[in-house]
Image (cartoon, helix red, strand yellow):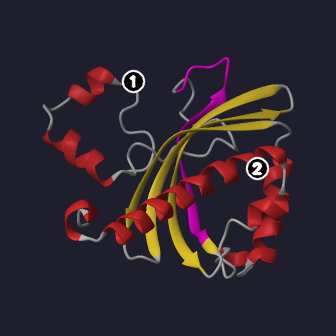
Amino acid sequence: MSDLRTTSSLDARLARLEARLDIQELAARYARAVDGRDLDGLVGLFTSDVNCGPLGRGRAALRSFFDQHLSRFYRSIHQLAGHAIDFETDEKALGTVYCRAEHEVGDRWIVETICYFDSYAREQDGWRFARRKVKVWYATDWEQKPGNGGFRTWPDDAAADLPQAFPTWSEFWNAAAPGCDSELSRAPTLGAG
């Protein structure tokens, strides 16, 4: 990744800045659309040929996914905490977005800390999500501490993905003094490995 401040014209730097702002706004619009159950607005944030796995490709398939997924909880709020973007080209970028999400599920109020791992593509009418993958640190009822009974008690007691999914996580702890992770955590090996 080059430093545009020293290698590019002012026009190129401004274009990159505009692209960064457009991409950052995607995350905020996503949160607002999910929490407001705006399915048209939500699917419009993705590329026209978005890959929805077994559901197929395109916004109609994505709408079907979100229609089912967003019916699993009543209220939600997605609070964004940080957004890092790395440009691959002028038309493609990767990013991560930290988020604290809360969901009303019957009598439970679920607090979930997540990181979105995104791919972005510029289409004719602007930047869109090409892919959005969610990884979870923990998801638990607000009355429980993360780690009591697992780091992810919703949905369906799935395993937590983070922080072990970060490629540098294992490298750091493998280089640390043996056993120090066990001194710092009751469950240092839970999650993706």
Q: Secondary structure at mark 2?
A: helix
Which residues make up the magenta segment? 127-146
* Residue 145 lies in the magenta-colored region: yes
- Circle 1 Cα neighbour tier, 10 Å, few/some/many (<14 / 14–19 / ≥20): few
- Is 136 placed above or below 103 here? below
**Foreground residue among 118 and 69:** 118
- Identify the residue at horizontal 69%, vertical 47% (top origin): 31
Residue 57 located within the stretch drawn in magenta: no
Residue 170 position in % (x across, y down): 26, 47
Q: Nearer the viewer, residue 35 or 5?
A: 5
Q: Is residue 27 left or right of residue 87?
A: right
User: Which residue is located at x 78 percent, y 65 percent?
Assistant: 65
Instruction: Pick whichever of labels 1 and 2 is earlier in the sequence.
Output: 2
Q: Which residue is mark 2?
A: 34
Q: Quadrant of residue 125?
A: bottom right
- What secondary structure is marked by label 1? loop
Residue 154 image-quadrant placement? top right
Q: Which residue is mark 1?
A: 186
Location of residue 19 in the rendering, given as x and y in whole percent from the top left corner: 49, 64
User: Going by the picture, which residue comes out furthest to the top?
Assistant: 143
Instruction: Report x, y in % for residue 175.
Output: 13, 41
In the image, is residue 45 above or below residue 83?
below
In the figure, is residue 57 to the left or right of 151?
A: right
Q: Position of residue 54 (x, y in %)?
A: 70, 77
Q: Which mark is residue 38?
A: none
Residue type of the residue flagged with mark 2 = Val
Please give the count of numbered marks on the rendered protein.
2
Quadrant into which the N terminus falls: bottom left
Residue at coordinates 82% horizontally, 42% vertically from top-left?
73
Q: Left of 147 or right of it: where is 184?
A: left
